[in-house]
Amino acid sequence: MLRGILGKTFRLVGYTIQYACIAHCAFEYVGGVVMCSGPSMEPTIQNSDIVCAENLSRHFYGIQRGDIVIAKSPSDPKSNICKRVIGLEGDKILTSRPSDFFKSHNYVPTGHVWLEGDNLQNSTDSRYYGPVPYGLIRGRIFFKYYFDAEKLFLTEEAGERA
C-alpha cells in the first residue's frame, strides 16, 4: 500500500516537473500574454492593455524599425518595458529630451537598438538611458486584445435591468 502511494506521488511529481519545464520553454522561447502598464505607449497601448508577445523574432534577429517590443529595463533589470523600436544598429537618431532645447544626434552601436515610447512627453526611454542592448529584448508584440470592460463584467445595475 505504501509502495503504491509513493509510486503515485513520484509519478505526479515527475509529471509536474515535466509540464513546468514545457511551460517555461514555451514562455521563454515561443511567447506569452503580457499586461502593459504605464502611459509611455499611449495612445497605441493604454495602461492595463493585454497584448501577445512572440519571442522568436529576437532569437533570429527579426526585430525591425516600428516594432513594439518588450525588453528588460536598462535602469531596473527586475522590470520590463514596452517601447517602439526607432533605430537599429548603425542608425543615426535625431533626439531631444523634453527638458532640452537643442536636438542631438546619437548613433546606435552594434548589437543595440534605440527604443522610445509613443507618448514622448511621458516616457523614460533611450533618450534617457541610451541605446538598449539587443540581448535585453524579451519579445515583439504582435497582437493586442480588444475588449469592452463593461461587457466583460456584470454589474448590479446590469442585473437589475434584465
Image (spheres, rainbow, N blue to C red):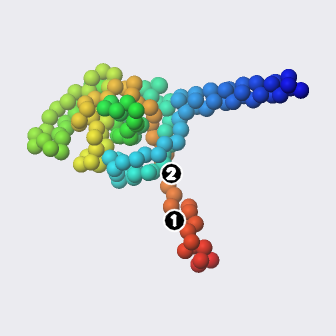
- Residue farthest top in this picture: 110
In the rendering, at what x and y percent does residue 4 appear? Answer: 86, 26
| Residue 63 visible in the displayed image | no
Residue name at image x 75 percent, y 29 percent:
12
Secondary structure found at label 1 = helix
Name the outermost residue toward the bottom: 161
| Quarter of the image where the C terminus is located | bottom right
Please indicate whether residue 162 sits to the left or right of residue 67 in the image: right
Front of the two marks 1 and 2: 1
In the rendered image, residue 144, in percent from the top left (x then y), is placed at 48, 48
- Taking the image as shown, residue 72 lies to the left or right of residue 28, namely left
Residue 123 higher or lower than 132, as above or below? below
Image x and y of residue 143, in percent: 49, 45
Instruction: Determine whether label 1 and label 2 are within 8 Å by CB.
Output: no
Circle 2 SS class: loop
> Within 10 angstroms of label 1, few (less than 14), some, or many (20 or more) residues?
few
Q: Amino acid at mark 2?
A: Tyr
Residue 66 falls in image quadrant: top left
Disc number at residue 28?
none
Extreme front residue here? 2
Residue drawn at point x = 69 percent, y = 30 percent: 16
Between 18 and 156, which is closer to the camera in this rendering?
A: 156
- Badge 2 density bin: few <14, some 14–19, many ≥20, Cα 10 Å: few
Q: Residue at x 24, y 48 (%)?
A: 121
- Image location (x, y in percent) of residue 156: 57, 72
- According to the picture, the residue beneath numbered tag 1 turns out to be 150
Residue 154 vertical position relative to residue 24 in the rendered view, above or below: below
State the separation of the CA atoms marked 1 and 2.
Answer: 15 Å
Q: Residue at x 47, y 30 (%)?
A: 57
Q: Quadrant of residue 25?
A: top right
User: Mark 2 highlights which residue?
Assistant: 145
Under mark 1, the amino acid is: Glu
